[in-house]
Image (cartoon, coloured by chain):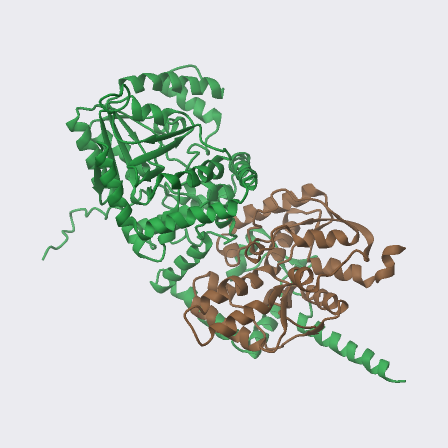
Amino acid sequence: MKVSLFITCLTDLYAPTVGMAVVKTLEHFGCQVDFPADQTCCGQPAFNNGYPEHARTLAQRMIEVFKKADYIVTPSGSCCAMIRDHYPHLFADDEVHQPEALEFVGRTYEFIEFLTKILKVDLTPYRLPEPVDFTYHYTCHLRGLEMTGDPCIGLLRQIGNCRFVPLEKAEQCCGFGGTFATKYPDISGAIVRDKVQCGNRTRAQVMIVNDGGCAMNIGGAGHRYGSTFAVRHAAEIIATALEGGKDNARR
Amino acid sequence: MPVAEPHKKVAPPRLALPVFVPDFMASASAQSANESLHTALDNSVTKKDYSRRTMLAALPDADALRALAGNIKRHTLDHLDYYLELLEKNVVAHGGQVHFAADSQQANDLVIAIARRTSSHLIVKSKSMVSEEMELNHALEAAGLEVVETDLGEFILQVDQSHPSHLVMPVIHMRAMEIGKVFAAHFKVPYTDDPPTLAEMARVYLRNRFNEADMGISGVNFAIAETGSVCLCTNEGNGRMCTTRPRIHVAIMGMEKVIPAMEDLPVFLKLLARSASGQTLTQYTNIITGPKRPDEHDGPEEFHLIIMDNGRSRILAGDYRDTLRCIRCGACLNACPIYRKVGGHTYGSIYPGPIGALITPLFNGLAKHKHLPHASSLCGACYEACPVKINIPEMLILMRRDQVRTGITSRAERWIFDLWTWGLRHRWSYRWGQVVQRLVLRRFPAKDQWIAKLPGPVAGWTRVRDFPRPPRHDFRYLWKEHQAAKQATHGRGATP
């Protein structure tokens, strides 16, 4: 299966190891991963701030760059939701580009969604070298991806040594919201402090955050105010478990 | 040609909605640091949000019910002229009188005229958001009439001379202690903060006012076109007292409150109380059709229905028609992470929270409330909570677009987005941007790879949290390394 990785600008620059964990996981399950180097941004910041024409320019570019891909997989929930929820509307009045836009949308998946819906992976044979308690931040944009029911938690729980601790107010936004975080820092700060406090109360060592922006936000607030958990992308946990190989679980 | 005389003050144009907090940013900053408010809101609105979830999850198919409610509203709004005429016809057929008001001033004048004609002096009132929109109490008092709010929360606000901070829980921002002080001063009694004692004080006082009142004013939760009825949902029973005891009943509604038929009502009743307060039904659900009949003992002698536009037909004609579906349940407020941190007053309008952030600028103009559409993380909790499926985040984005198009957004920001988009249209400029970002950011002091203070556009970020220091190598570099390593392994594997 040929999979093209859409890394997203934040992950590219700030969390490259998340990208590598995604690559290793996909390759482990037999995908032929490729990285179209021309990719830049999906246009989400422009769209959210009220510049749909700008977003459309970048959307058209995305469609072009990923033309040859069977599947497009991205580790960032909000970028995926931008494509899935808003690209169809961006091209609604454009008979020429709409078909390829819809077709592109249909091939785009969020990382966990791809593992559960397309690859249908089974992680029960794998385990982490050390026991880890993890909690899970429900990133808001999963709402648009029909990923309620948290398949990510289910998937991680298959891994040996990986225990789930529920998070208080799990459905409450972390306060990132793109430019909102810098335009309204006081409100955003109050929301993310709440998230860090809820995370600390779980006593989990790891908070799973599958979105580049939310991870920067919760991680940064955690460092400022003191958190007892590390912010990780699910791909990092999965890749670590896969590294041990199948036999690891039986030992 | 009339020329404004410099020595005469020109009255500013009347806004459709009253505005009572002029500076959004100052209020937002203050409330964001108000941890006792956050705790209070978590104990009330956040809990209500969880009750709503539980109650809706217990329905066989809540999502289908919400879709149905949304579609009924959409249909009604698409044919609003027809249903308003039908409503008028049927109210009149049952002995009621219907008045249309173009704006809140006309609506206030209508109420005053009815009061004068019927020699009404004392007016009791049940909770109504549209009357807040009209600032009805001010208008009535200015006309020399006495008006008493009878919903406990609204009564407290009237005594305290303050504004509601929530659509259904108007005094959610006040603690029992504060209410105790207000009551002690008003009733001239010793201070207490015991909620049952405070409620009893209000109850005894209001009971007498109900008996003495000439006129009762109510809002309308739903107006049923087919039967000419109005439906009122309350929890305290004061609505029933206001609409049955006095000689005159005046019901006031925004023109979007009409629904086609009685068979549509249960759809909304099922959703309203569940969404608002996690109840299956409100304690009292009144369906009122016209005044007292000749053979009836109770009820008012006259029934008036005032249907107010106040900018709604303008909203109806534009891109934001869906906002008129709102049934004022407050579920979006309870679900909103922003509302939970800043409370209702920061929005500066009687309509706070996500729906308020949308409709306040629609009523008063986008330039007047330029922060409201932006002070949202677009998390979508409001859309998920809305019982009539108003896509609030999508419309907030639309409103941001309209701000850009009408030049309300600063020219600087528009240039930044032009430049940013241009930069992302080319691989080289994207790469260049990333490299510069990394080089610049790596020059700032960092602790554990986190930067505590940054200038310029990210100063806001580091005011409340740290910023990550970009690692030495980006993903593209790691990817190349990975490809090289794979090729090397592949090459070794191929050699016999």
Residue located 57% across and 77% down the image:
A65
Q: Is residue B80 visible?
A: yes
Q: Quarter holding the C terminus of chain B?
A: bottom right
Chain coloured green in this rendering: B
Please identify which colour was used for chain A in the image: brown
Left or right, residue B284 beside residue A135 = left
x and y percentages locating residue A75 in the rendered image:
64, 63
x and y percentages locating residue A116 in the rendered image:
68, 59
Please say if A94 is above or below B35: below
Identify which residue, B25 or B87, lies in the foreground: B87
Residue at far left of view: B1
Identify which residue, A48 or B429, lies in the foreground: A48
x and y percentages locating residue B65 in the rendered image:
48, 45
Identify which residue, B310 or A187, lies in the foreground: B310
Please say if B91 is above or below B485: above
x and y percentages locating residue B420 in the rendered image:
49, 70
Q: Is residue B409 visible?
A: no
Identify which residue, B425 or B168, lies in the foreground: B168
Residue located 36% across and 38% down the image:
B262
Q: Quarter holding the N terminus of chain B?
A: bottom left
Please say if B421 is above or below B205: below
Left or right, residue B299 beside residue B474 = left
